Image (cartoon, rainbow, N blue to C red):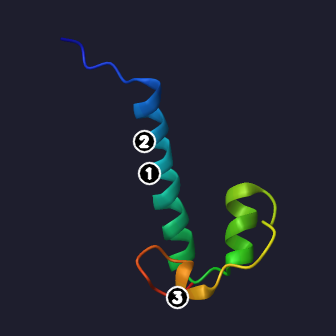
């Protein structure tokens, strides 16, 4: 039996890696605006309240 990675599995792996990177950036104390520009290349519309910026509940 070959443990092939399906497209769905690859999607979830990439999403988990992105979430981990996002949390690492935000937990360093970077502002949400700076994190958005680093991760996406542009600022997202709207504001994210600071308590929700870090996945563990810490303030960004």
What's the distance in space between the residues labelled 1 and 3, CA to CA? 20 Å
Looking at the image, do the residues carrying marks 1 and 2 touch, with CB atoms under 8 Å apart?
yes
Q: Secondary structure at mark 3?
A: loop
Measured in 3D between alpha carbons, the distance from the residue under mark 1 to the one under mark 2, in whole angstroms, is 5 Å
Q: Is residue 43 visible?
A: yes
Q: Quadrant of residue 1?
A: top left
Disc 1 designates what residue? 16
Q: Nearer the viewer, residue 34 or 54?
A: 54
Left or right: residue 58 versus residue 37 is: left
* Coordinates of residue 37 in the picture (x, y in percent): 76, 65
Mark 3 highlights which residue? 59
- Kindly identify the residue that appears in the image at 64 percent across and 85 percent down: 49
The spot of residue 40 in percent (x, y) is: 72, 56
For residue 42, side relative to residue 16 (left or right): right
Which residue occupies 56% across, 75% down?
A: 26
Q: Quadrant of residue 6?
A: top left
């Amino acid at each position: 039996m070959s443990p092939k990675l399906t497209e769905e599995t690859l999607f979830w792996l990439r999403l988990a890696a992105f979430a981990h990177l996002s949390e690492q950036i935000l937990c360093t104390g970077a502002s949400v605006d700076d994190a958005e520009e680093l991760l996406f290349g542009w600022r997202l519309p709207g504001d994210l309240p600071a308590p929700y910026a870090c996945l563990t509940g810490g303030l960004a």
